[in-house]
């Protein structure tokens, strides 16, 4: 069908114009006399042409997307399983493969940056290297077993990067700790032989779709000067993004290009708690600046605005991003804003009207780029036309046309 791109529309209540994108061979709808509702009307028109009439009781999955927990469990208790998926311990085969990767010079093709506010750390491996110190003033040397202790992670607060000690965690097999409202901006270890100095000689690498942090031991006290050797296998930990239970997935159209209806311009999961909402951004198929709760999703995923992420085709692959925003009582109230030249466009899901966002279960597999949602999910259109509380249209998909 015809693709329509809104280049700019006069926005009621704003003095500026809303810029929403550009592409080739599309209808230019620019008209400085058009009010804001003209944009919405055009979207409604194309929606109804594509999907037919909308059930007036259609709430787009948000009716029950409400707060389900009122408080956190203590991170040092056995209550984790009540609200978050606990990752399995690394297997012997996994440890062997990861150790092999980290025991070689760094493969830049495997280096990653990750951005998680909520995550697990798991002990994978501790080396048993013995280092010979530099000769002291009397010419004596000594052999020292590298000792790394007190794993440190860090979160960003304004212009500051703040370290946080991972309590009750050490280099013991099976050791696992959940970090909440924390961060992966930096990793470090405290060297017990160097007066508690924290070192940040680490690299993050991806092995079989999982993320690992490897440290390179060094020591710089008066009696023991040991240089890092560029091999990051002295201590290896695994970092696993937290997967919360009772979570909702939100799929969005940013109105940049109208007519593809792939609902992958941003795809994120939302976990609602009494004092915060945990957002996990899975994909960003839109090329416009788009923010969830005030956080620009491309930036959160470590790519430039305009780069499509995790939607197949010409998109790049990147780790999901996890961050926290203010608490809401319903996932529908999470602010999703598309940035224009001088104004923002807030995505809506009004009952009985064409949605710009839809709430689905986290089992939903989002569409690849420019794959119409009704082609990937043949029962979607029936759900649009006649709301059924028990409909599971999101389960019947064409596997080759959706993302995993």
Image (cartoon, helix red, strand yellow):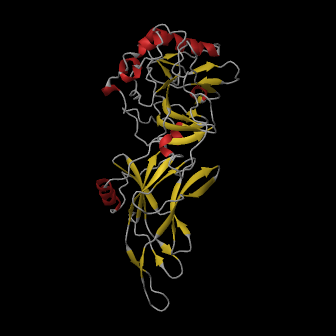
Looking at the image, residue 134 lies above or below residue 315: below
**Hey, which residue is sitting farthest bottom in the picture?**
138
User: Which residue lies at the image location 53% right of the left edge and 74% below the top edge?
Assistant: 194
User: Left or right: 30 with respect to 303?
Assistant: right
Residue 303 in view here: no
178, 189: nearer the viewer? 178
Residue sticking out furthest to the top: 53
The picture places residue 295, in percent across and down from the top left corner, at: 58, 38
Q: Tell me: residue 5, above or below residue 249.
A: above
Looking at the picture, tell me which residue is in the foreground, 237 or 45.
237
What's the residue at 52%, 42% (across, down)?
322
Instruction: Indicate the quadrant where residue 172 lies.
Output: bottom left
Q: Position of residue 112 (x, y in %)?
A: 43, 50
In this rendering, position of residue 11 left or right of residue 259: right
Quadrant for the N terminus in the image: top left
**Relative to the observer, which residue lies in front, 114 or 274?**
274
Instruction: Provide residue 382's location: percent of width, then percent of height.
Output: 42, 11
Q: Quadrant of the C terminus?
A: top left
Query: Viewer-proximal residue, 224 or 71?
Result: 71
């Amino acid at each position: 069908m015809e693709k329509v791109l809104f280049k700019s529309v006069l926005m009621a209540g704003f003095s500026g114009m809303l810029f929403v994108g550009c592409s080739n061979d599309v209808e230019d709808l620019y008209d400085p006399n058009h009010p804001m509702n003209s944009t919405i009307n055009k979207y409604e028109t194309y929606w109804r042409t594509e999907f037919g009439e909308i059930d007036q009781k259609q709430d787009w999955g948000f009716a029950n997307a409400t707060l389900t927990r009122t408080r956190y469990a203590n991170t040092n208790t056995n209550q984790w399983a009540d609200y978050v998926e606990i990752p399995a311990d690394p297997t012997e085969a996994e440890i062997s493969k990861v150790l092999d990767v980290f025991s070689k010079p760094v493969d830049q093709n495997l280096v990653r940056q990750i951005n998680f506010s909520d995550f697990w750390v798991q002990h994978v491996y501790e080396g048993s290297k013995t280092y010979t110190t530099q000769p002291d003033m009397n010419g004596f040397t000594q052999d020292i077993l590298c000792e790394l202790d007190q794993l440190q992670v860090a979160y960003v607060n304004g212009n500051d990067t703040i370290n946080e000690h991972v309590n009750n965690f050490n280099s013991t097999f099976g050791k696992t700790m959940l970090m909440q409202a924390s961060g992966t901006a930096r990793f470090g270890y405290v060297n017990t032989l160097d007066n508690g100095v924290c070192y940040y000689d680490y690299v993050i690498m991806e092995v079989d779709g999982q993320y690992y942090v490897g440290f390179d031991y060094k020591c710089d006290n008066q009696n023991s000067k040991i240089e890092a050797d560029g091999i990051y296998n002295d201590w290896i930990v695994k970092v696993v993004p937290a997967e919360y239970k009772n979570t909702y997935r939100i799929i969005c159209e940013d109105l940049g290009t109208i007519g593809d209806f792939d609902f992958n311009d941003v795809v994120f999961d939302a976990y609602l708690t009494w004092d915060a909402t945990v957002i996990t951004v899975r994909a960003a198929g839109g090329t416009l600046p788009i923010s969830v709760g005030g956080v620009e999703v491309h930036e959160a995923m470590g790519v430039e605005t305009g780069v499509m992420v995790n939607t197949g085709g010409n998109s790049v692959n990147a780790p999901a991003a996890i961050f926290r925003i203010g608490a809401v009582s319903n996932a529908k109230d999470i602010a999703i804003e598309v940035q224009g030249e001088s104004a923002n466009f807030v995505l809506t899901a009004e009952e009985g009207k064409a949605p710009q966002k839809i709430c689905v279960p986290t089992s939903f597999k989002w569409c690849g780029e420019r794959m119409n949602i009704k082609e990937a999910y043949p029962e979607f259109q029936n759900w649009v036309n006649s709301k059924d509380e028990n409909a599971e249209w999101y389960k019947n998909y064409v596997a080759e046309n959706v993302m995993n």
